[in-house]
Image (tube, rainbow, N blue to C red):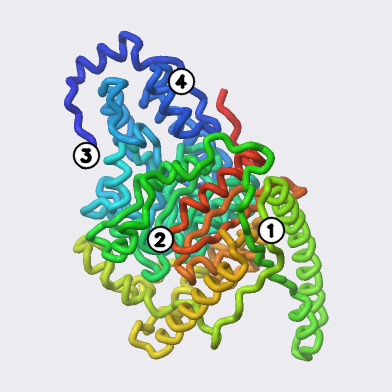
Amino acid sequence: MRARFAFPVLTALLMTWVGAGTLSAQPVDVMEATITDVQRALASGRLSCRALVQQYLDRIDAFDAQGPTFNSIQHRNARVLLEADSLDALPRTQARGPLHCVPVLLKDQVETRDMPTTYGSALFRDFVPLRDATIVERLEAAGAIILAKTTMGEFAGRYVGSAAGIVRNAYDPTRNPSGSSAGTGTAVAANLGLVGIGEDTGGSIRGPAAVNALVGLRPTLGLVSVFGMMPANPTQDVLGPMTRTVEDAARVLDVIAGYDPRDPITARSVGQRPASYRDALPASAQRTNALRGVRVGVLRTRRDSVADLRAARRDSTLSADSVARLEARVRARHVEFAKGLAVFERALGELRALGAEVVDSLVVPPVPGRRVGNDFETEEATDAYLAQHPNAPVRTFKEIMLAGVVNPWRARSMIQYVGKTTHDPDYLTVLQNREAQRTAVLALMADHQLDALVYATYDAAPTRIADDVLTNPRPDDEYGLGDNRGLSPTLGFPALTVPAGFTSDALPIGLELLGRPFSEARLLGIGHAYEQATRHRRPPPTAPALR
């Protein structure tokens, strides 16, 4: 039984209430429903919590468990209907909290003590933690229901894992859903739950949100507790909302943000939070001049494979066939970048039309040295985390790698972490370079008086899934093509992606806004104004309303 749900009303009384028709009202359509839509229907008696939850369960059956599947749901909460009944037993005027009866899809990297937490790995398929994560406790205290755990890239990397296989994009199941919060992104996009929670170490909230036409917020490092979550890189790991609207993201952030003594880094957030993030959202964003006075700086990264091609042509060890294949790939990449760029340029035009001052073609000054990436923390952090769980199937990161279970593609990238520690002198270089880059970005924003930096989350739409991603450590997969997600995690600054529109072949592109530390309210306000004026979000045709 979940800690936050009690059942004080006698079953007989509850069934009498249901039989009288109070809770058996015609269900409200969940397609693209928002928290406001649902709570108004609940308050009016037009909808019961049970009916709401059942609709999502029916959609999971229809689109994730039978026939062609997204493979986005890892575990369902077996008690979810009983928990809904518990909320229905309350008087309609007595909501449990601000997320009363909000069905949440939770990335399976986050601990739940009544469902397995697999981290996307078959090694942890039967592992049930003895505690709930802080974010779970806060969601449930606010009245939310954990509907299901979502499939993720194994140990927080990419979109495949030994626990469940391949997660697929909601808009085109032959294409990747980004990662590693892949299941949350696909499931929320397909309306299999009301809102979702993802985790972002290098882009794992914003990537799946961008390629699934969602809103995804990576909070400032230290705003949201990560206690009860398996770490990847503690100086980068964050949890945040993945939703279909900016307002829903603000509502979720209001509940999950704030100091947690079990995660001391969240002490940074004290005094940095507004009374409510919803207060930053314009009451009624107008279609003209909605962003008057807002200044955004455009970051453009030229991703061109011509240099690689020229080098290959000079390489006498490569066959003519190899060079020809590379030439074909370069041409295909240019086509994909052109499609993504067209959407991004339209988005910049929309920002200007809404009154924003757009400062184009800015460049973040390079940091001294090369290293800002971090592979020194993972083994130490994983070992410390596993030590907190006496019932874990393994005790160390090395045991994970030696088990021979991890997807080969993921294992190839994870093996580089073995033997590295935060005592390595190169780790100090990483920290120094990061601090230099923070200063450079803050100076750039100050010099140009910017509210945010703006760029495409990906310069190109998601690529097709390679046939051998489950078996080949080096699959012919172009996952991450055009990836611009790395700046925010390196800095620890917040970033928000919102739908910017669709390519000519109907694939989503995300517009990303990066701000100063603890500027979530400002980013949400800008994102909301843009969203309300453009209305780019539309549900995927692969998951229509049920008849």
Q: Nearer the viewer, mark 1 or mark 2?
A: 1
Residues marked 1 and 2 touching at CB (< 8 Å): no
| Left or right side of 305 for 216 | left
| Residue at image location 56% in from the left, 68% down from the top | 446
Q: State the residue at coordinates (30%, 39%).
A: 142
The picture quadrant where one finds residue 226 is: bottom left
* Position of residue 351 measured from the top left corner of the image (x, y, whole percent): 68, 50
Q: Residue at label 3?
A: 1
Q: Earlier in the sequence, mark 1 or mark 3?
A: 3
Q: Amino acid at mark 1?
A: Val
Residue 510 location (% of width, % of height): 62, 53
Q: CA distance from mark 4 to mark 2?
A: 35 Å
Q: Which amino acid, by three-letter code, is at mark 2?
A: Val
Given the current orientation, which residue lies at the most extreme top position? 20
Q: CA distance from mark 3 to mark 4?
A: 27 Å
User: Dot 1: within a 10 Å radius of its alpha carbon, few (fewer than 14), some, or many (20 or more) residues?
Assistant: some
**Mark toward the viewer: 3 or 2:** 2
Amino acid at pointer 3: Met
Residue 507: tell me if it is visible.
Answer: no
Residue 32, image x, y percentages: 55, 33
449, above or below 211, in the image = below
